Image (cartoon, coloured by chain):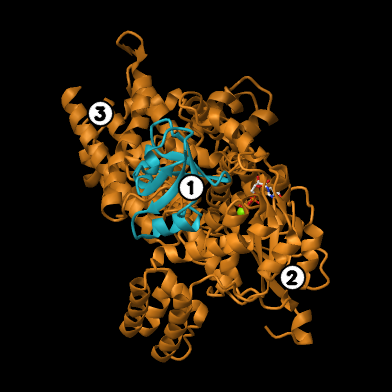
Chain colours: A cyan, B orange
Amino acid sequence: MPTLDELQTGEAATVTALEGDDTYVQRLMELGLIEGVRVEFLRRAPMGDPLEIRIDNTFRLSLRREDARRIAVERAS
Amino acid sequence: MTNSPQTAAASMRVVLLGNPNTGKTTLFNALTGHRARVGNYAGVTVEKREGPLRDAARAVTLVDLPGTYSLAAHSADEFVAVEVLLGLRRDTPRPDAVVVVADASNLERNLFLATQVLDLGLPTIVALNMIDVAEKDGLRIDAAGLSLALGVPVVPTNARDRKGVTELAVRIADADRLPVPTAPAVFPPEFVATREALATELAGLLPAGTACDAFAAGRVLLEVDGTFEERLVAAGGEPVRAAIGRARESLETAGHRLRALEARSRYQWIRTHVAPHVKRPAAGTRRASQETTERIDRVLTHRIWGSLIFLLLMGLVFQAIYTWSAPLMDGIEGVFALLGDWLGGMLPEGALQSLVVNGIVAGVGGVMVFLPQILVLFLFIALLEDVGYMARAAFLMDRLLSRFGLSGRSFIPMLSSFACAIPGIMATRTIENPRDRLATILIAPLMSCSARLPVYTLMIAAFVPEGTVAGFLSLQGLVLLGMYLVGIGVSAPVTWILKRTLLKSRTPNFLIELPPYRKPLLSNVFSRMVDRGREFLVRAGTIILAVAIVVWALSYYPRPAEVFERYESSVATANAPYLTGLASVGVAVDEAPGDAAGVEALADAHETVAVDFAAWAEELAALEFERDGELLRRSALGTMGRAIEPLVRPLGWDWRIGMAAIASFPAREVVIAVLGVIFDLGPETDEEDPRLKEKLQAAEWPDGRPLFNLPVALSLMVFFALCLQCAATIAIIKRETNSWRWPLFAFGYMTALAYIGAFLVYRVSSLLL
Ligand SMILES: Nc1nc2c(ncn2[C@@H]2O[C@H](COP(=O)(O)OP(=O)(O)O)[C@@H](O)[C@H]2O)c(=O)[nH]1
Ligand SMILES: [Mg+2]
């Protein structure tokens, strides 16, 4: 199963799982990054990190690559 | 929630709560008509904004809370918002009602917080703000249906164009008569049962006076290591901790992942209960707001264009603080100099005059002079924030700063500090992680600010040869660049060490929302700017003034009589030939002039070429400077300088340089004027003054060796580059960290670094040159 950081620019996917048991994961989920939600990988920052993603075609978040690695996704067909 | 007639007519407090960037402040301004009282919550640097509801029949106080995504708070801003909401802060009474400001174009996520608030048992109103954006995006929200689903009034608003604001105000004015909403049934039955059981169990374990209802018990369970748990454990100790642990375990064994439980449950509820009232455009339709933002982002975060525009923008900000503020600063300095002269002329010569002119007026002027830079910086910050660019700046810079354990948020504070650390430190409030913020505050004063420039200019002009290196690089320019690099170079390891010792924390997770780009609302921008300026004057101003007066006293007292006696006899000697000259043409002078001004008065009164009045006045002026120099050298400050001479010898300094350095601790830029007085040139000297350069070049040790040479100049410059000689910065660090611990720490570590740096530079350059 790919993780969020492995998506291509512009690619969309569905969140399948979030790994870890800390406040960061809790916050991601509170923001709506939960199982079944559609995410798009918009771009990387010019220096390669962090990443910009869009959730549910509604709002954008930026997070670092190492954190995006904890989010498992399924590519949209 | 009593509804007796007395309380209904009495005053009421209503808080505006919501996610960041939903338009809370804009709505607050519209509801109050920009009549805000701005301050700070006690003990933290979170802005407190309160104001009366406009045109209301009764007194309603509105509170604009900092943005928060959840009751499970993460940053200082969020903690305060939640504490105020729950009535846990001693400085702010519990609210009587809540307005949840929800972004209609991002409804589901905003309702996560709204459903949390519905659990509180407070009268609640939902303002569906940004309704214009939602409509443009093709979302149709049925406010009445939504209101039924949530069980609270729902008012669509467009705070920007003040639409729906009156309707909202009418609702707010009666908010405490609203029925208390029922908590939506979002959680699975096991959780509800465990929550009730825990509440009952804790009631037995907690001391009287500490309440724990089902709501609090629920928060305890959901917020692992959160503040609810912390409070109850503090009150009830180990048994409470154990009871909480058991309750959590039973839920985990029943298959509920606690970290995920609340988000899953609430979003599930929102999807089933709210979705029917929102008509979304057909799947795959592009949303107007997203499209615009995406188009702009394609340029502004582009690998090349984005970086270039960022550099240009930052260059502009820096240029603005550094250069554009300069005329205003000169103006303020000029006004205070005039004021000083004017008051000096009104008051009789003596201690009072000197206190007023050199202590108070100079001190107040020293505070005011920072104002232009602060206003200019915050004009830019407020503008960039309102437009939505600040988050992009953090996005672009995060990689670079994460190498030192900081995040992209630290960039603008650090850049600003090159102009002046004070606005830079005030700008650190946008850094969410408290340890990152503190680290940034502690290194900000290492950036070479504009007040260091006069020292560099003087030392370089006097002691660095003019030649070039490699044929075209000016040696003087290189040394100047080197001084800037010293600060940057030192700040990297300092940050690195701080983040691994005192401010140890995992490299914080970086998680920011990149809000849609919006047209800035200038009224928002200006009120932000003015608030910051006022805050600086009130909070930092008093400390700076106090320090200015202390240093004035140290440099004024004692005033040995023999210095004045010697001055008078020198004046008499200097006067003698001129008085004879005047007598020879029949001009009798009743009272010999006591100073240069006296000579000028004589010159005006007697038109004669028998004596050279100009030369006479100059002689007396020189004597006066000599007297003042002697007074300063024998002042308490001079005594301190002599006392520390053994300490500064290793840096290549004598007591006079040491004394100038001490005198510059309140404000480094005064060093030029102090050197001017010490070397008998009077206080009006500036760094371009060729006489000061000559005096320094001619200064000697008692044994006749020159006092200054290139190594000494370098050592002095490095000392100034690294030392925290600025009372205003210390005051603002105290203000921003709310304790004396961190300003003292910054002062201590920077003084130590400055000393070591100056010592090394002196030794090494003495060997090499
Ligand atoms: N289109 C639109 N923009 C709004 C509305 N309310 C606020 N804004 C803009 O949204 C941005 C954030 O507003 P602000 O009041 O600072 O949000 P806060 O962080 O919740 O206090 C600003 O650029 C406002 O001009 C609205 O109803 N419609
Ligand atoms: Mg606000």
Separation of marks 3 and 1 at Cα, in angstroms: 48 Å
Chain letter of disc 2 in the image: B
Going from N to C along the chain, the mark reached first, 3 or 1, is 1
Decide which of B133, B37 is in the foreground and name it.
B133
Query: Which residue is disc 3 drawn over?
Result: B711
Of the numbered discs 2 and 3, the one sitting upstream in the chain is 2
**Mark 2 to mark 3 CA distance (whole Å):** 67 Å
Q: Is residue A67 above or below residue B471?
A: below
Q: Which quarter shows the C terminus of chain B? A: top left
The chain carrying label 3 is: B
The answer to which image quadrant residue B242 occupies is bottom left
Q: Secondary structure at mark 1?
A: strand
Image-based side of A54 in relation to B703, left or right: right
Report x, y in % for residue B491.
33, 40
Q: Are marks 2 and 3 on the same chain?
A: yes
For label 1, the residue is: B512
